[in-house]
Image (cartoon, rainbow, N blue to C red):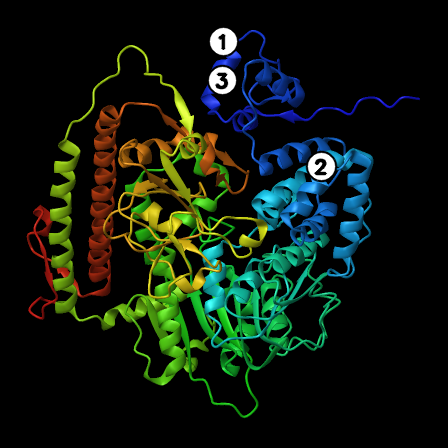
């Protein structure tokens, strides 16, 4: 009996825009203006779905060649596979196998007839299965040919990690159903940097996608051990780590770490962990006499304290652990006895409070607990460090408010909130205080309102409340009143100057209404402009990219990373700052050197702030970071500010972005109007003015937040007193001794 034809995939309007290389507004116009545009085949009135093959046929009839990149083609085939009941986990091993193939081998595989392609993929998976022991056997079917072909092409053109990210979008990342959430990269890096020295053997007993272990590998770890309760997460983590750290020994197992520890005899140099929170069914009754509870049996409501002791049990004496934990466990009555024993024994070394939005759950200010397994006969630990980085949230929020947001960031499911934080300031405060404390705990002076070392005796009261905000706040009384008053005056003067500058900038006029309807123009993609010689598109090659056939660039601008040069990152573009990246973090062997007039576009459309800017003198000579695209225009054909303004436009970024959890910008698909150079310059001057307005707004907002913070802290800390004229709008003055009691 003949088999019925396989159903076609259904796509959304957003996916149609990415396939055609146009904006979503253009797709909406097509739907309204063309009667022959395919009718919805599913979905709802507010979110219709369209038959993919019908859409492709309609686009072809209109002369629109598919602009979908390999990752978008893979998403399309994955959607079809999911509609027929297929999962994604069986493709993870194939990514690992394909990443070990040369570009020529991948091209040849993608061109095989369907039956041969399925057989070839089956053999590839078999070669990779040995690298990840314990995985179930994978068997591909004839219907899988389309997704296998797309996967090989995606690995060939965009690399194994990008392909892995596409597979993870549907089932793994930020999944409310599975409880799987990624730890933001800046936070993972912070936890890894809190571990002193250079640990070689690192364990993450709730490894998820492997973000924390990858951060440890970037800092030199060579033995990576992970365990996760979800088999698909464990497999994804293993594959990801083998791709990012091929020189490391990777061992990942799937099981419940508390109930079925896969590494019972492992003693690691360091443990990094972001465990699940608020789990009551963690094994309290069956694990009541477990030898790991050296500091007391955790209460049923204290699963987090079980993870803390699990981490300590897996450390070598003197080894450190950094865990991301909810703030409630610092003060809950049910955990008081275990907290007291952690403090008394010296196992708890520091508690660092993070701003709200640092990681999921986004409405809670999480904490990092730094622990150290006591050494027999070791030095007595008399104090615990507490750091409160909440003030850095205000700085980051202020900076974000000054930048102006992009609507596309709402699709990152909270990633934008984490990206908008001032991670540079958070890390500087946390790491600076921690390093000073570890060098000499007894001589540590701290920073009033930010970091404070509290004696063990002072912590062991009836509640053993380890909340950093409460303990650090007490240190504000140590600030000198005259010094704080002078600081407030300086901040206020700066704020007044910034406000005046902002008013001057906002008062300029350089635009007028276009008329009754919006202006329309012909556009070209950045790829078309590059082929025509109007611009050159450069990027920092990821490690291993040259072996996949990437070119070195013909303009001589690429070079091996120079540790004397700073690196310009995507966060720098968003914040409007100069280059702040560390060249040691560049893992590739080449990086473009930025020149004045280059147009810089963020490669990931997450977080607030502008997506693009023109490189100035402060950027010249810096190395291009891996998450920034560089467009070098021919000044005789393209105005730099005109190019930056249109490349960074919200609709343009949305139309050229792919992904659901993390929106990745495809630079070649960004579109630019075709205008005479003189007209470009007029637009360019307007975009330059917009950039200056954002910069002035950022500066004024930052100074306003800083001034308000100093004033509020001085008033509540007792260093500042309102003057007798304050009720009528008078100034504040320093604390005096001539006031009546």
Mark 2 vs mark 1: which is more N-terminal? 1
| Count of number-bearing discs | 3
**Measured from the top left, where is residue 289 in percent x and y?**
72, 75
Q: Quadrant of residue 282?
A: bottom right
* Residue furthest bottom in the image: 377
Assess disc 2: are there few (<14), some (14-19) or many (≥20) residues with their C-alpha within 10 Å of its C-alpha: few
CA distance for labels 2 and 3 = 35 Å
**Measured from the top left, where is residue 693 in percent x and y?**
22, 38
CA distance for labels 1 and 3 = 9 Å
Residue 33 is tagged as 1
Q: Which residue is mark 2?
A: 111
Assess disc 3: are there few (<14), some (14-19) or many (≥20) residues with their C-alpha within 10 Å of its C-alpha: few
SS label for mark 1 = helix
Assess disc 1: are there few (<14), some (14-19) or many (≥20) residues with their C-alpha within 10 Å of its C-alpha: few
| Residue nearest the viewer, comparing 533 with 44 | 533
Residue 28 is tagged as 3
Tell whether label 3 touches label 1 (CB within 8 Å). Answer: no
Please report the residue visible at 66 percent of the width from the left and 47 percent of the height from the top: 178
Image position of 102 (left or right of 143): left
Tell whether label 1 touches label 2 (CB within 8 Å). Answer: no
Mark 1 vs mark 3: which is more N-terminal? 3
Q: Can residue 399 be seen in the rendering of this structure?
A: yes
Q: Nearer the viewer, mark 2 or mark 3?
A: 2
């Amino acid at each position: 009996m003949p088999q019925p034809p396989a159903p076609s995939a259904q796509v959304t309007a957003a996916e149609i825009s990415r396939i055609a290389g146009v904006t979503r507004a253009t797709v909406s116009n097509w739907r309204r203006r063309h009667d022959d545009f395919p009718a919805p085949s599913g979905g709802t009135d507010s979110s219709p779905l369209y038959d993919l093959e019908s859409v492709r046929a309609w686009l072809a009839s209109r002369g629109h060649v598919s602009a979908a990149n390999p990752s978008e083609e893979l998403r399309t085939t994955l959607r079809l596979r999911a509609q027929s009941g297929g999962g994604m986990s069986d493709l993870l091993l194939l990514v690992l196998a394909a990443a070990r193939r040369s570009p020529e081998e991948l091209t040849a595989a993608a061109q095989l007839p369907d039956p041969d392609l399925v057989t070839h993929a089956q053999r590839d998976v078999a070669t990779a299965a040995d690298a990840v022991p314990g995985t179930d056997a994978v068997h591909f079917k004839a219907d899988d040919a389309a997704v296998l072909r797309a996967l090989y092409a995606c690995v060939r053109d965009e690399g194994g990690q990008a392909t892995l990210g596409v597979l993870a979008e549907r089932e793994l990342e930020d999944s409310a159903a599975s409880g799987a959430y990624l730890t933001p990269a800046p936070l993972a890096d912070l936890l890894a940097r809190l571990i002193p020295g250079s640990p070689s053997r690192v364990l993450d007993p709730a490894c998820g996608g492997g973000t924390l272990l990858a951060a440890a590998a970037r800092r030199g770890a060579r033995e990576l051990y992970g365990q996760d309760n979800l088999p698909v997460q464990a497999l994804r983590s293993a594959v990801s780590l083998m791709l990012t750290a091929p020189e490391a020994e990777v061992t990942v197992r799937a099981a419940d770490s508390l109930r079925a520890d896969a590494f019972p005899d492992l003693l690691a140099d360091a443990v990094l962990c972001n465990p699940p929170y608020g789990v009551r069914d963690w094994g309290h009754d069956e694990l009541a006499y477990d030898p790991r509870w050296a500091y007391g049996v955790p209460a049923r409501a204290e699963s987090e304290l079980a993870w803390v002791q699990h981490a300590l049990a897996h450390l070598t004496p003197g080894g450190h652990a950094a865990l991301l934990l909810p703030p409630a466990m610092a003060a809950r009555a049910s955990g008081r006895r275990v907290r007291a024993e952690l403090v008394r024994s010296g196992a708890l070394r520091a508690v660092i409070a993070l701003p709200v939005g640092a990681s999921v759950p986004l409405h809670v200010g999480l904490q990092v607990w730094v622990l150290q397994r006591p050494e027999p006969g070791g030095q007595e630990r008399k104090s615990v460090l507490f750091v409160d980085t909440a003030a850095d949230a205000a700085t980051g929020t202020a900076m974000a408010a000054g930048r102006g947001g992009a609507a596309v960031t709402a699709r990152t499911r909270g990633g934008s909130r984490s990206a908008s934080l001032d991670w540079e300031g958070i890390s500087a405060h946390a790491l600076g205080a921690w390093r000073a404390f570890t060098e000499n705990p007894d001589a540590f002076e701290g920073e009033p309102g930010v970091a404070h070392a509290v004696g063990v005796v002072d912590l062991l009261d009836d509640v053993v409340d380890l909340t950093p905000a409460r303990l650090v706040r007490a240190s504000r009384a140590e600030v000198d009143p005259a010094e704080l008053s002078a600081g407030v005056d300086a901040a206020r003067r700066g704020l007044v100057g910034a406000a005046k500058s902002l008013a001057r900038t906002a008062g300029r006029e350089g635009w007028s209404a276009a008329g009754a309807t919006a202006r329309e123009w012909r556009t070209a993609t950045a790829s078309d402009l590059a082929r025509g010689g109007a611009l050159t598109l450069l990027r920092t090659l990821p490690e291993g990219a040259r072996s996949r056939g990437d070119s070195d660039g013909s303009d001589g601008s690429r070079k091996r990373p120079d540790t004397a040069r700073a690196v310009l990152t995507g966060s720098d573009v968003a914040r409007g700052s100069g280059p702040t990246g560390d060249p040691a973090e560049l893992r590739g062997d080449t990086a473009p050197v930025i020149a004045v007039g280059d147009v810089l576009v963020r490669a990931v459309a997450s977080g607030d702030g502008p997506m693009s800017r023109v490189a100035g003198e402060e950027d010249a000579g810096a190395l291009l970071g891996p998450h920034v695209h560089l467009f070098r225009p021919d000044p005789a054909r393209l105005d730099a500010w005109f190019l930056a303004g249109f490349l960074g436009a919200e609709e343009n970024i949305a139309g050229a972005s792919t992904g659901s959890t993390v929106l990745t910008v495809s630079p070649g698909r960004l579109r630019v109007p075709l205008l005479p150079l003189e007209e470009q310059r007029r637009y360019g001057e307007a975009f330059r003015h917009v950039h200056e307005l954002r910069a002035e707004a950022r500066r004024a907002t930052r100074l306003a937040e800083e001034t308000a913070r100093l004033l509020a802290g001085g008033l509540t800390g007792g260093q500042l007193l309102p003057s007798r004229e304050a009720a009528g709008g008078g100034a504040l003055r320093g604390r005096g001794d001539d006031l009546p009691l």
